[in-house]
């Protein structure tokens, strides 16, 4: 029996908690794997002794799989933040003598904290990244090539429901629905869509399914609300806040086009969700999205920050049923290649290789 400890956020409104739960659900189907969850508070514990207690409960000479995102290991004190990740990985390696796998969900090479973190990532025995761009970035920053392992973000099997019934349930029958899904933040580019909404047909409604987490994100939401008010778009923009799985199914199936006008991104579980429902999707032409376009051709791209190009791509896709059907077909291919079963198989293979 191979015992695996997961250091991760858990049972909370958090994308990492959600994706880890789906991976664990898949791994638990194997009779030769036993999973123990070592949960981290979503907001980042302010006291380092929280992690000492966490690590003390991990047995020696096992495998520990860390889900890394800076928020989970960073206490926020005023405008200054630091990271406990170096402490965690150092003691896990030399005190608990564990084999360490770290999945890097997001890292910003321009961030002072993440520049430091990259140095400590080399203490991991293996590093999982969800796309080639992140692998190349870490390699350029000094991570050893033989430690890097590519496993894509998993995609769930989603239930396809009647679009008209879902729109009726949301109170937007006979409307064209554009949806931005995920946590609200400046990097997500919601403002770009709000700025062009008056130029789209009046039957186009924007749904923002997500909520802000940090002070900066809350301020950004206030900025969006001011834009909406100034342009008198209150009847054409709906903020739904955090949505649970039941709500998500209705929102996704009601959507005509998903939008991901991101300014920067490493990987996006929110995008996988859209593709799992086979919804035509437009994203900015960041490297991550260009890689998906190249490998699967399941999304449309617009020039990042270019509102006119975004406007034209939305208008074109909404009026082109042939292209919509093509993208839906390519979504099915993407979903098959990135299923959680496939991700679970690859992760298990990595565990067995290390032992």
Image (cartoon, rainbow, N blue to C red):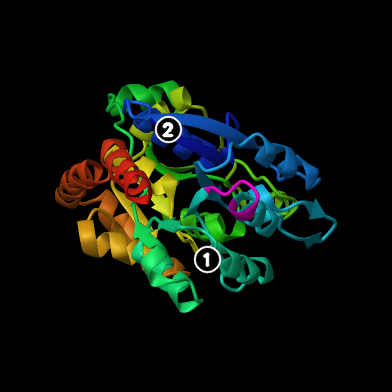
Dominant secondary structure, magenta: loop
* Circles 2, 1 touching at the beta carbon (< 8 Å): no
Is the N terminus in the top left, top right, bottom left or bottom right quadrant? top left
Taking the magenta stretch, the answer to whether it contains residue 37 is no
Q: Which mark is residue 122?
A: 1
Q: Which mark is residue 159?
A: none
| Towards the viewer: 252 or 13 | 13
Q: Total marks drawn?
A: 2
- Between marks 2 and 1 in the image, the one whose residue lies nearer the viewer: 1
Mark 1 element type: loop
The reply to whether residue 344 is visible in this rendering is: yes
- Mark nearer the N terminus (2 vs 1): 2
Q: Residue 2 location, x and y as percent?
A: 40, 35
Measure the C-alpha gap from mark 2 to mark 1: 25 Å
Q: Residue 40 location, x and y as percent?
A: 65, 39
User: Is residue 344 left or right of 12 when viewed as pictured?
Assistant: left
Q: Residue at x 24, y 53 (%)?
A: 298
Badge 2 crowding class, 10 Å Cα cut-off, few under 14, some 14 to 19, many 20 or more, is some
- What is the residue that sits farthest to the right in this orientation? 78
Q: Residue 297 location, x and y as percent?
A: 21, 58
| Towards the viewer: 321 or 25 | 25
| Towards the viewer: 329 or 21 | 21
Q: Which mark is residue 24?
A: 2
Q: Is residue 277 above or below residue 327?
A: above
The reply to whether residue 241 is visible in this rendering is: no
Q: Which residues are magenta?
A: 93-98
User: Is residue 179 left or right of 280 when viewed as pictured?
Assistant: right
Q: Residue at x 52, y 66 (%)?
A: 122
Q: Residue at x 27, y 45 (%)?
A: 338
Mark 2 element type: helix
């Amino acid at each position: 029996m191979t015992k695996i400890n997961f250091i991760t956020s858990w049972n909370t409104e958090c994308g990492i908690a959600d994706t880890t739960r789906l991976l664990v659900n898949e791994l638990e189907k194997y009779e030769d794997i036993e999973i123990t969850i070592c949960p981290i508070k979503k907001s980042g514990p302010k006291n380092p002794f929280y992690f000492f207690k966490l690590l003390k409960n991990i047995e020696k000479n096992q495998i520990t799989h860390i889900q890394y995102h800076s928020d989970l290991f960073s206490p926020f004190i005023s405008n200054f933040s630091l990271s406990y990740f170096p402490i965690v990985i150092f003691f896990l390696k030399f005190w608990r003598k564990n084999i360490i796998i770290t999945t890097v969900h997001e890292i910003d090479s321009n961030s002072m904290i993440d520049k430091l973190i990259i140095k400590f990532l080399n203490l991991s025995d293996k590093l999982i990244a969800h796309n080639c761009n992140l692998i190349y970035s870490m390699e350029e920053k000094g991570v050893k090539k033989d430690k890097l392992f590519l496993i894509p973000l998993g995609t769930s099997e989603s239930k396809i429901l009647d679009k008209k019934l879902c729109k009726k349930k949301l109170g937007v029958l006979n409307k064209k629905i554009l949806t931005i899904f995920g946590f609200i933040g400046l990097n997500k580019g919601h403002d770009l869509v709000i700025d062009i909404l008056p130029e789209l047909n009046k039957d186009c409604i924007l749904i923002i399914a997500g909520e802000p987490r940090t002070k900066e994100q809350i301020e950004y939401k206030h900025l969006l609300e001011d834009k909406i008010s100034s342009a008198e778009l209150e009847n054409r923009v709906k903020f739904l806040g955090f949505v649970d799985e039941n709500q998500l199914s209705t929102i996704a199936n009601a959507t005509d086009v998903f939008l991901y006008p991101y300014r920067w991104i490493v990987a996006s579980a929110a995008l996988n969700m859209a593709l799992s429902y086979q919804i035509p999707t437009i994203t900015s032409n960041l490297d991550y999205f260009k890689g998906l376009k190249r490998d699967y051709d399941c999304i449309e791209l617009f020039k990042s920050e270019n509102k006119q190009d975004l406007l034209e791509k939305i208008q074109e896709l909404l009026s082109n049923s042939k292209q919509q059907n093509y993208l839906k077909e390519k979504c099915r291919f993407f979903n098959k290649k990135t299923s959680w079963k496939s991700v679970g198989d690859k992760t298990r293979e990595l565990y067995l290789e290390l032992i």
